[in-house]
Image (cartoon, helix red, strand yellow):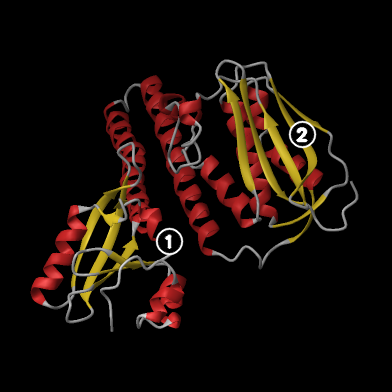
Amino acid sequence: MNWMKRNLKTVDDLGSVGLPPVLAAALNSLPLHSVILDNQNQILFKSNNFESLNILSDARISNENLLALVRLARRNSESASGEFSIKRGAIGDAQRQIWCKATVINEEGSVLLVIDDESERTRIDAIRRDFITNISHELKTPITALGLNSDALLISLNDADRAADFAKKIKAQSQRLADLVQEIIYLSRLQDTDPELNKVELKVIDVIKEAVDLSETNATARNIWVDISNVSEISVNAIKDQLVTAVHNLIENAINYSPDGTRVSVNVEIKTESNQELVEISVKDQGIGIAESELQRIFERFYRVDPARSRTTGGTGLGLSIVKHVAQNHGGEVKVWSTPGIGSTFTLRIPLLKNEVN
């Protein structure tokens, strides 16, 4: 098997020197990245996705960790594997986490190097760790406050006014803790259940009215008017409680981050994108707005643009994350437009029920 032949670029070329075309095709079909090196580390074959790793320089592997792994495999005449971080691109500090295995495949010292990009799994693991850390912190805060206020209440039993004040604080923290636990459970259910099982035909106006009703107490207390416009007899195929919760969360978010005496507008439009008709439910406020640097993170669990304000309004940091998951469960998405000092518009986009009349 002449693995020493140079300048091989195609599957057919490889087949002519002994690598079966079916094997080359198989390597190309795998999600793994693979390359075959001769004993001078010249590339005899590389999978179609290999260059996406950005580890080639002048048609040779430039990463020293990978080359050291290749040398180790040759020295031991067997396979060698390891995990490394490599730069994601030519500029910047972003890293890609990879697992790789080098295997000597003939007596001349040619090596098959297989690389698995573990970046996505690493990212998910990091999110999971962050979630555990965040949830521990979020639960600890109200629990600590409950303990402190309970102690203060016991000391103040002979002072009715002070006792009443501490009792109110205990009630508020208890409610915050209950809301947090409820939203954590709800978010977990969103991710664990099959969204297709419970979908029914729903009129969008009914969903919006129910969501607005749920926000009536908060809106009235803040003297904020919630205005519904441009809603006709539009229907969607959706899970009722999820869609109501998503719209309600957007309305509550708009109220909580708006000045007293302003207006929150709920608007519905039908758009066509890639031959798919979509219902867009937009919630617009006249609030503080969100800086552009924050927009990429606002749908993350427990992320708050203004943590102090969120705690004052009773926010858990999960509301927008729930909206995102509801949109995904319905084959849609949520978009945001915002300008600091002017306000924000959140738009929930889901497919229109087929045969619906515009």
Mark 2 packing: few (<14 Cα in 10 Å), some, or many (20+)?
some
Where 335 falls versus 351 (above or below)? above
Between 21 and 144, the one lying in front of the other is: 21
Q: Position of residue 335 (x, y in %)?
A: 62, 38
The dot on residue 196 is: none
- 10 Å crowding of disc 1: few (<14), some (14-19), many (20+): some
Camera-nearest residue between 252 and 172: 252
| Secondary structure of the residue carrying numbered label 1 | loop
Q: What's the residue type where badge 1 is placed?
A: Asn
Q: From this viewpoint, is residue 120 visible? A: no
Above or below: residue 5 compared with residue 273: below
Cα separation between marks 2 and 1: 44 Å
Question: Of residues 56 and 188, which is closer to you in this image?
Answer: 56
Quadrant of res 262: top right
Going from the N terminus, do you reach mark 2 or mark 1 first? 1
Query: Residue 143: x and y, percent?
Result: 33, 40
Estimate the x, y position of residue 214 in percent, counting from the top left: 67, 39
2 vs 1, front mark: 1
Judge from the rendering whether residue 186 lies leftward or rightward of residue 28; answer left or right: right
Q: Amino acid at mark 2?
A: Asn
User: For the residue labelled by badge 2, is the local secondary structure a helix, a strand or a loop?
Assistant: strand
Image quadrant in which the N terminus is located: bottom left
Q: Which residue is mark 1?
A: 49
For the image shown, how many numbered marks are present on the structure? 2
Q: Which residue is mark 2?
A: 267
Residue 6 place in picture, x, y as percent? 30, 68
User: Can residue 220 be seen from the camera position used here?
Assistant: yes
Tell me if residue 305 comes above or below residue 318 in the rendering: above
Q: Is 34 in front, or is 32?
A: 34
